Image: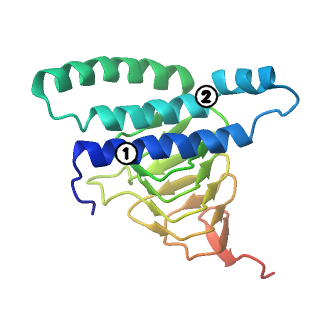
């Protein structure tokens, strides 16, 4: 459970996250020329989504009634268009640590809590169980990679330094330093055959 923070604490936190997110995307650029690197950043779907996700979280912490409502309406319309166009939907109540990387665009739906330096590929779904009343959302540690097409569902905990394989379906807790594969997902400790 998170505690309510004031606008300036949130602003400082989200700006720091934007900087660290940028650093991750910048590190993935083509290093042949500065022009190609800048073009990569201008056309990088994941960077756009993370920048506007963090901007939206700043807007939702503004407490001035008229300004707040106006900015929220404008942002939600823009966010709807952007997320529909890119096929990447991150719920604004998700807590996502700095350095979050979206490697590819398309069919990504996220609602949960992520630690630092996590990464997702295309076709990933993170959220609550769809049948009946929601039992909650996944909580991820630091340095987690979720492979293409994977589904992580329910009120579960995923440890630090975990790799979730492509098309895996994870419905149970996963300890630190694990590799998860299969449907349903089964884990083994990394480095052990």
Q: Which quadrant would residue 134 be assigned to in this image?
A: bottom left
Q: Is residue 131 above or below residue 177?
A: above
Foreground residue, 48 or 77? 48
Q: Is residue 124 above or below residue 106?
A: below
Locate residue 159, reporting x and y percent: 53, 71
Circle 1 Cα neighbour tier, 10 Å, few/some/many (<14 / 14–19 / ≥20): few
Chain-order first, disc 1 or disc 2:
1
Q: Is residue 149 above or below residue 30?
A: below
Q: Quadrant of the N terminus?
A: bottom left
Residue located beneath label 2 in the image: 45
Q: Residue at x 33, y 22 (%)?
A: 75
Residue located beneath label 1 in the image: 12
| Apparent side of residue 109 relative to residue 91 in the rendered image (left or right) | right
As drawn, the label of residue 171 is none
Locate residue 186, reporting x and y percent: 63, 71
Locate residue 49, reporting x and y percent: 51, 31
Q: Residue at x 67, y 27 (%)?
A: 41
Q: Residue furthest right?
A: 32
Judge depth for marks 1 and 2 and give the one in front. 1
């Amino acid at each position: 459970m998170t505690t309510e923070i004031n606008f300036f604490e949130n602003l400082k936190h989200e700006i720091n996250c934007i900087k660290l997110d940028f650093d991750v995307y910048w590190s993935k650029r083509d290093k042949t020329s500065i022009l190609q690197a800048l073009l990569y950043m201008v056309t990088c779907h994941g960077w756009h989504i993370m920048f506007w996700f963090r901007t939206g979280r700043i807007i939702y912490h503004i407490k001035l009634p008229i300004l707040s409502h106006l900015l929220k309406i404008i942002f939600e319309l823009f966010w709807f268009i952007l997320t529909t166009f890119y096929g990447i939907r991150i719920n604004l109540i998700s807590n996502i640590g700095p350095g979050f990387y979206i490697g590819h665009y398309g069919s990504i739906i996220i609602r949960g809590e992520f630690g630092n330096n996590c990464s997702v590929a295309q076709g990933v779904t993170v959220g609550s169980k769809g049948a009946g009343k929601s039992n909650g959302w996944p909580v991820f540690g630091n340095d987690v990679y979720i492979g293409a097409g994977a589904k992580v569902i329910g009120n579960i905990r995923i440890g630090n330094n975990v790799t979730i394989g492509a098309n895996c379906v994870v419905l149970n807790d996963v300890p630190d330093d694990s590799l998860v594969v299969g449907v349903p997902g089964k884990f083994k400790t990394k480095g052990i055959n």
